[in-house]
Amino acid sequence: MDRSKVIFGNKISNTTYKKAIKNKKKFIKKFGDDSNKNYPIGIRSNPIIGPALGVKEIVLEDNGEQIDIDKALIVGNIRMGFGHYRISMAIASAAKHLGYTPYWLDLHDYKESTGGKVISHLNNLYSFGSRLSQKSKLFNKFYWEPLNSEGFRKLTYNSADQKVSELMAPVLKNIPKNIPYAATHVWPAQAAIHAGFTNVVNVIPDNWPMALHLAEGSKHAVQTPSSYFGYKTLNGMGKKTLKPMPDGQLFEVGHYIDHEIVTNIEDDCIKRLDRINNGKALRVLITVGGAGAQREMFVKIINQLIPLVNNNKAVLLINVGDHKKVWDELCSDIPLLKESTTEHMNNWQDTLDFSSQAINGEIKGIHTFYHQDIYAAVYSTNLLMRASDILATKPSELAFYPVPKLMIKRVGGHEAWGAVRAAEIGDGTIECDTSDKIELMLNLMFTEKNILRMMTENILKAHNIGTYNGAYRVIELLKNK
């Protein structure tokens, strides 16, 4: 079946199909054709998330270690920003808890393959666009926002993507095709279907339905009811009403959250309520994106919080991920920041020790975290959020996590709906898209206890009805083939 010609019974025009073929040929001309190459497969342990999540990595080398087929569950992913890795960690965590060995398969990591080169090229273009959207209001308004909300929404876009993702399938040739396979980005899902995998769940991110995320032949998992109805009807994905997704191919499962976070929601919320109700210092966690997006907003947040830190009313935690340059720029913008901060720089054990202390005891001051290793850069936020009372972040994948959230301006129109979801559940604010709105909301969070108390209680309510159990349910979909 050519999945670029017909998508869920909806025929694609010949003009669009020919463009898809032409696009694929363009990439072959640029990066080569490895469709007949026989890639070896090996396994290596992951030193950062291996101990906690049981993760092993699939590598393109014959190192003697093989996949344990009886216990294996593949987590197919791409590092494209931190969000897809974060979802992957949640799926791996749930898989381990339910008795599987999660095997990490990052198509972006296979840089010698044609697919890896294509992904790297497209990722660079997306990162450039993301950075430019923060610098140019005109580019953001007239190109970036429309592309991320409406351009990626069309079924014609999926047609082109399906043809390109055929180039990503060769590296999967020597992996047994009956292994359960959860894909946290659409390309690994499409590649798995093209390669012949028979049990694939496409773990869809965000809360805005877009044809970009479709991988026909897999089961599709979404996090929210509104997303379910949008995907079910392929709403807005064509010029006219389309044939819907067939029964049994789409499931609303809830938010994709790590087992370690879900099982500790009640204890963590009790500790938050204790700090809120008894006037203890509130912990604010700031996660700065790799592109340094919204830097001006973060600078203003930090400047607003420093006096509260000095008066023991706040504790500030800053995670700059794997981008040391971002920390250097923040220190340049705020001259007093570096000398006032305890730095946790590229020392994973130190971060583990601090996180444990923060969850179970008292902390004070300003602490900054940087890790060159991508796994540590992402997972450190997961550890620190458990000890935090406020997470200041753009409404990306973190919008779905069970921690009170201050939602700052989005990067890309699709992210707006993450803030809508958080605000409706009541575990996050509306999107505060200007510095004035952020300053007001942050001030209210510190001066009116009922706001954080309400958010924390809403997390407990949502937890009681299984809102944060999406990762477990993805594994159940794979079990019930």
Image (spheres, rainbow, N blue to C red):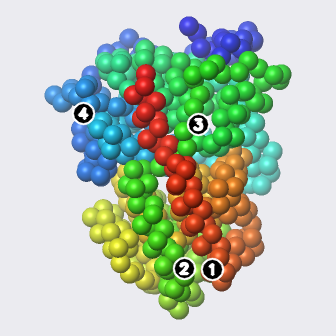
Question: Mark 4, mark 1: which one is toward the viewer?
Answer: 1
What x and y, as percent, mark residue 138? Answer: 80, 51
Of 323 and 79, nearer the camera is 79
Whichever of labels 4 and 1 marks the residue nearer the N terminus, that label is 4
Q: Marks 4 and 1, how far apart in space?
A: 50 Å
Q: Are the two marked residues, 3 and 2, in contact with CB atoms closer than 8 angstroms?
A: no
Q: Earlier in the sequence, mark 2 or mark 4?
A: 4
Which one is earlier in the sequence, the residue at label 3 or at label 1? 3
Quick one: SS at disc 3?
strand
Callout 3 amino acid: Glu
Reading the image, the residue beneath label 3 is 252
Mark whose residue sits in front, 4 or 3: 3
State the image coordinates of residue 235 (x, y, percent, origin top left).
75, 30
Q: What residue did someone put label 1 on? A: 449
In this figure, which residue is indicated by the disc labeled 2? 276
How far is mark 2 from mark 4, CA to CA? 46 Å
Q: Pointers 4 and 1 in contact (CB under 8 A)?
A: no
Question: Which comes sooner in the sequence, label 1 or label 2?
Answer: 2
Q: Amino acid at mark 2?
A: Ile
The first of marks 3 and 2 along the sequence is 3
Residue 78 vs 136, above or below: the answer is: above
Q: Is residue 119 above or below residue 350?
A: above
Residue 187 to residue 403: above or below: above
Which residue is disc 4 drawn over?
43
Badge 2 element:
helix
Answer whether labels 1 and 2 touch (C-beta < 8 Å): yes
Q: Is residue 5 visible?
A: yes
Callout 1: SS: helix
CA distance for labels 3 and 1: 33 Å
